[in-house]
Image: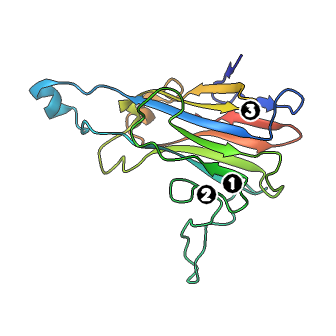
C-alpha cells in the first residue's frame, strides 16, 4: 500500500523493502473546466487550451548544486547533455536516468509523464535529485496551478509497487497555487538509505 506524504515528511527507501534498481517518478494531472458563457470568457483570464505540465529533474552534487549545465565552447549553458533532465534533454549521458516522453495535455488515466532513475547504478557523485513541475509557457499563456486539478507525483519501485504518492494541489498554498507556473515537488536524497521527501 502506498504512503501519502505531506510537506516535510520523508520516506526511507530501504533496499530490503524496495527494489531501487529502477525507480519511476510519475506525474499526472487534469485541467479544471473553464467557466462558460460571456462573463466566464471575459473574466476567466486563461485560455481554454491545453496546459502542458513538465517534470524536470536536477542532478545535484554534495553541495546541492548542478555541476554540469551543458556548457558550449563559449562557456554558455545550453542544458544539452547536462545534469538537467527535461523535454529537450530526455536522457542523461550516463544512461541511468531518463524522461520517457512529453505529454502536452494530461489526457488519459495514470501517469502523464515519467522520469526513470536506475538509482543503484547512478554515479556516487550525485547526492540528490530535485524534481520540479512547471507549466510550459505558463506565464505567456496566463496559466497557473490554480487551473489544474488531480495533479499528483508518485514514486514506483522496480517491481511496480507504488511507494509514495503526493497530491500537489492539496499541499500548495492558495496564493502560490493561483500565481505560480513552477513548483518544486520533491527531493530524492542518497543517504545511508535513500530518502524521498516532498517539498510542496
Mark on residue 84?
2
Label 3 belongs to which residue? Answer: 157
**Gap in Å between the C-alphas at discs 2 and 3?**
22 Å
Label 1 residue SS: strand
Q: Is residue 44 positioned above or below 121 on the image?
A: above
Q: Nearer the viewer, mark 2 or mark 3?
A: 3
Q: Is residue 199 visible?
A: no
Pointer 2 and pointer 3: residues touching (CB < 8 Å)?
no
- Residue at 36% x, 40% y is 51
Residue at the far top: name it: 1
Frontmost residue, 162 versus 71: 162
Label 1 belongs to which residue? Answer: 59
Q: Is residue 3 positioned above or below 129 on the image?
A: above
Pointer 1 and pointer 2: residues touching (CB < 8 Å)?
yes
Label 3 residue SS: loop
Which tag, 1 or 2, sits closer to the chain's start?
1
* Snapshot quadrant of residue 174: top left
**Gap in Å between the C-alphas at discs 1 and 2?**
6 Å
Amino acid at each position: 500500500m502506498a504512503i501519502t506524504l505531506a510537506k516535510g515528511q520523508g520516506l526511507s527507501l530501504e533496499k530490503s523493502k524496495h527494489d531501487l534498481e529502477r525507480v519511476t517518478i510519475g506525474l499526472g494531472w487534469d485541467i479544471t473546466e473553464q467557466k462558460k458563457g460571456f462573463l466566464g470568457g471575459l473574466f476567466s483570464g486563461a485560455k481554454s487550451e491545453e496546459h502542458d505540465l513538465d517534470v524536470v529533474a536536477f542532478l545535484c552534487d554534495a553541495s546541492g548544486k548542478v555541476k554540469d549545465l551543458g556548457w558550449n565552447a563559449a562557456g554558455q549553458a545550453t542544458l544539452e547533455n547536462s545534469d538537467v533532465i527535461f523535454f529537450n534533454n530526455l536522457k542523461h549521458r550516463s544512461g541511468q536516468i531518463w524522461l520517457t516522453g512529453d505529454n502536452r495535455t494530461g489526457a488519459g488515466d495514470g501517469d502523464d509523464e515519467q522520469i526513470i532513475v536506475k538509482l543503484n547504478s547512478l554515479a556516487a557523485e550525485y547526492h540528490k535529485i530535485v524534481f520540479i513541475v512547471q507549466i510550459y509557457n505558463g506565464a505567456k499563456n496566463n496559466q497557473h496551478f490554480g487551473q489544474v486539478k488531480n495533479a499528483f507525483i508518485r514514486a514506483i519501485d522496480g517491481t511496480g509497487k507504488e511507494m509514495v504518492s503526493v497530491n500537489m494541489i492539496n499541499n500548495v498554498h492558495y496564493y502560490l497555487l493561483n500565481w505560480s507556473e513552477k513548483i518544486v515537488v520533491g527531493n530524492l536524497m542518497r543517504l545511508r538509505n535513500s530518502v524521498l521527501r516532498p517539498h510542496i
